[in-house]
Image (cartoon, coloured by chain):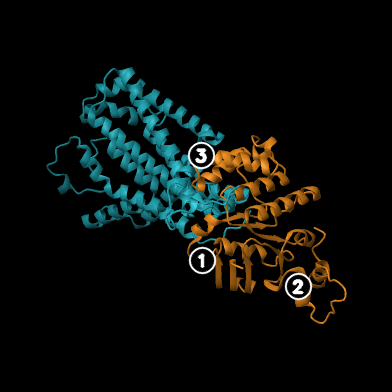
Amino acid sequence: MNNAHPNTRGKDRISTRPFWVMVQKEAADHARSWRFIILLGIVVLTCLGSLYTSLSNFTEALGKNDAENDFFFLNLFTLSDGTLPSFFVFVSFLGPLLGISLGFDAINSEQSKGTLSRIMAQPVPRDYVLNAKFMAGLIVVSIMFFTLSFLVIGTGLIVLGIPPTAEEFLRITIYTVLSIIYVSFWLNLSIFFSVRFRQPATAALAGIAVWLFFTVFYPLIVNLVLKGIEPSDFASPRAVYLYQKLKFALVQVMPGELFSEITSTLLMPSVRSIGPLTMEQLHGTIPGPLPPGQSLLLVWPQLTGLIALTLLCFALSYLSFMRREIRSR
Amino acid sequence: MEKIIELSGLTKRYGTHIVVNHLDMSVGKGEIFGLLGPNGAGKSTTILMMMGLTEPDAGTVRVCGLDPVRRPIQVKRKVGYLPEDVGFYEDMTGMENLVYTARLNEIHADEAARRAGGLLENVGLREVKHKKTGKYSRGMRQRLGLADVLIKHPEVIILDEPTLGIDPAGVKEFLELIVKLSREDGITVLFSSHQLHQVQQVCDRVGIFVDGRLLAQGDIGSLAAQLFPDTHMTRKIGLDEIYYRYFQGGDDHE
């Protein structure tokens, strides 16, 4: 061994190369893990199921003569015959599961296996660990979702024999990107729990608890609250309007609700508004689809909210990880 | 002698409990320094502060002239740290684990593989280098840990209880390896242990650490003079005598 130090050149320079080495390792770990294979199986199977129901109902949907007919390709993602939920409902249901399961043991398992203190003794900034875990999850989820979306398009193409229009393709791509953002919110949340809780099981449970709270209990609570303050039939329009506004605002903290508003607006161009509208606002509108830019603009607040929630989880993980003492085991 | 590690007035508290209490210590270049003390004396905490893995409440640390609180990355480029009970990625082989560490140190993959191969040979893990580390015994893991520390060609290595869980023959081999490395490559070694025989065997200088304070530091002869100034040096005081006197023979059975 010689005593040369090729790695000490550039005193304060911090390279990003170790970061990508870490990302590569984490992504490979994900791809090889049983957990991911099982999740992939679940997602692929459910998507195949919903694709089948939407395809078998397609002729019916084509027969209807409405605005959505212009975008029949998007029906692949939204159509359902009632036996199985449609593709986008499945994704919004399985997304949290995917995110939570990819992140819940990110930091705490490294700690309990004794590898964290070894990695932290290497010349890499501490946040590389968090960022690499997140980035690896993001890459894996992105590949998976884009593959799924494009497979759905491909299947539609073969079965229907009609290619999607450029606008439909654009909408599907945007939808896929937004699903990835949605999953990355849950991924970040579970990474935060993995920093916070030493036991992976606790972290997983905490993630699932948040998910259940927002899908089951929070709507219940909101309903209870709203029932108490529901205006009577003879209330002034203003009171009714405010009530509707409040009703709308209360559900906006649910990540799932934000996501379903985003997806339904993007995949159904005929959706022109979310939230309450007055009769005056509706007066004189011609029912018709929105261009993709306008659809995106409509859900811009929801999208911002979702990204903000994601960043909040990230910030919390940083806060509790960056100055923590790293002991072995 | 050039000082590689310098601690002055170093203090660390957990709540009201003072773990490290106004510690002043220094380690010179190229020496093997033993940090000897019973469990819970604050040895590991002191080491964590040297690595920038925890922040001191008061006092300063200088490692290779750098402050690990402000510039942890630069410190970690020069210092190899073997944590107590080191862990590896169990679904990767010993070789893969080493190459991964090397690549985190920005060593190119080919060079990393070359160094890893050489080091695995040196620490006697050549036969098992393509086995998953999940199947390694405790002693093998510890030796892989030493290789892991050395792969970045450090100036200083800090070993926290490195011999824990290795059988006596293995310990002897391990210690000889450390001495060899230190002498051949001029690596400064800081070695913490609660087993005085090991410390006595390999260390140039020893610091005796009890309840967060350094009772004495120096070579074994001067330690006796520091701790028992009234004793006439007519008979040679062994380190074990010092040790038992201060630790009441508490931890030596481990």
- Label 1 belongs to which residue? B67
Foreground disc of the pair 2, 1: 2
Q: Residue furthest right?
A: B235
Q: Quadrant of the N terminus of chain B?
A: bottom right
How packed mark 1 is, by other alpha carbons closer than 10 Å (few <14, some 14-19, many 20 or more), is some
**Residue B11 visible in the shown view:** yes
Q: CA distance from mark 3 to mark 1?
A: 30 Å
Q: Colour of chain B?
A: orange
* Image coords of residue A13 (percent x, y): 42, 55
Q: Which residue is mark 3?
A: B109
Q: Chain of mark 1?
A: B
Is A101 left or right of A304, judged from the image as shown?
right
Q: Chain of mark 3?
A: B
Secondary structure under tag 3 reads: helix
Q: Position of residue B93 (x, y in %)?
A: 62, 37
Which sits earlier in the primary sequence, circle 3 or circle 1?
1
Q: Amino acid at mark 1?
A: Asp
Residue receiving disc 2: B223
Quadrant where the C terminus of chain B lies?
Answer: bottom right
Could you confirm whether marks 3 and 1 are on the same chain?
A: yes
Per the model, the C-alpha gap separating discs 3 and 2 is 47 Å
Give the camera-side residue of A83 and B140. Answer: B140
Residue count near mark 3 (Cα–Cα under 10 Å), binned few <14, some 14–19, many ≥20:
few
SS at mark 1 in the image: loop
